């Protein structure tokens, strides 16, 4: 199992080496053990995101769900279509289409996923890439997005699932400043 294409709803390959104090808790669901944080980016109108939760099962089981690219529309927000373009060793290239609410145009993206494993944890980094599929006039191509997923054993048949993301959705800009 290699890819974790689900990432593509958020943006390109980075992962903070250590937790920093500039992350602010924005949403929390204690019942489902989900926390979502945001951090300001000086170079963008859009914030970085970090989400963390725990899930039952093994790292391999959680990764298998994420790697089922055709099933992404069933669980990934706004994804209407996803398919594998190419797999090679620990990398994969995925094409995804997104539907957004009015007045935004539909989006699409091609992302390159890179999988690594260390001490039982799996890390999947994705970054948007160009040149794989011609742009479609009815969709805006997201060319600046990256995500990092980290799946770590948490003991007691639990997996710690972390997701970092950043990017630019392109198209219509929100004039009121930062999007939160």
Image: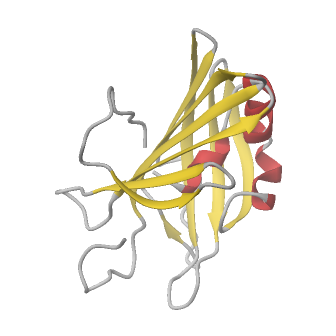
Task: Report x, y in % for residue 86.
Answer: 69, 35
Q: Residue furthest left?
A: 42
Quadrant of the image for the N terminus?
top right
Instruction: From the viewer's side, name the closer residue of 147 and 24.
Output: 24
Instruction: From the viewer's side, name the closer residue of 23 and 176.
Output: 23
**Relative to 95, residue 159 above or below:** above
**Relative to 105, residue 9 above or below:** above
Residue visible at 24% across and 48% down?
Answer: 22
Instruction: From the viewer's side, name the closer residue of 23 and 114.
Output: 23
Residue visible at 63% across and 48% down?
Answer: 33
Residue visible at 81% across and 29% down?
Answer: 57
Residue visible at 78% across and 24% down?
Answer: 157
**Relative to 169, residue 37 above or below:** above
Q: Quadrant of residue 56?
A: top right
Task: Report x, y in % for residue 113.
Answer: 57, 34
Task: Report x, y in % for residue 136.
Answer: 58, 70
Q: Residue furthest bottom?
A: 103
Instruction: From the viewer's side, name the closer residue of 38 and 1.
Output: 38
Instruction: Tell whether 116 sits left or right of 154.
Output: left
Task: Report x, y in % for residue 52.
Answer: 54, 43
Q: Quadrant of residue 156?
A: top right
């Amino acid at each position: 199992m290699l890819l974790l294409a689900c990432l593509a709803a958020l943006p390109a390959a980075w992962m903070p080496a250590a937790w920093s104090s500039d992350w602010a808790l924005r949403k929390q669901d204690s019942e489902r053990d989900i926390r979502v944080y945001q951090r300001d980016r000086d170079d963008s109108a859009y914030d970085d995101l970090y989400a963390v939760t725990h899930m039952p099962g093994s790292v391999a089981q959680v990764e298998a769900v994420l790697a089922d690219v055709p099933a992404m529309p069933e669980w990934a927000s706004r994804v209407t279509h996803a398919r594998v373009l190419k797999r090679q060793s620990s990398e994969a290239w995925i094409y995804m289409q997104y539907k957004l609410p009015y007045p935004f145009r539909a989006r699409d993206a091609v992302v390159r996923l890179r999988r690594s494993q260390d001490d039982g944890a799996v890390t999947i980094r994705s970054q948007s890439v160009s040149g794989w599929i011609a742009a479609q006039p009815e969709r805006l191509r997201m060319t600046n997005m990256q995500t990092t997923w980290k799946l770590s054993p948490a003991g007691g048949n639990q997996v710690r699932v972390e997701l970092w993301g950043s990017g630019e959705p392109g198209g219509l800009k929100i004039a009121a400043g930062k999007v939160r």
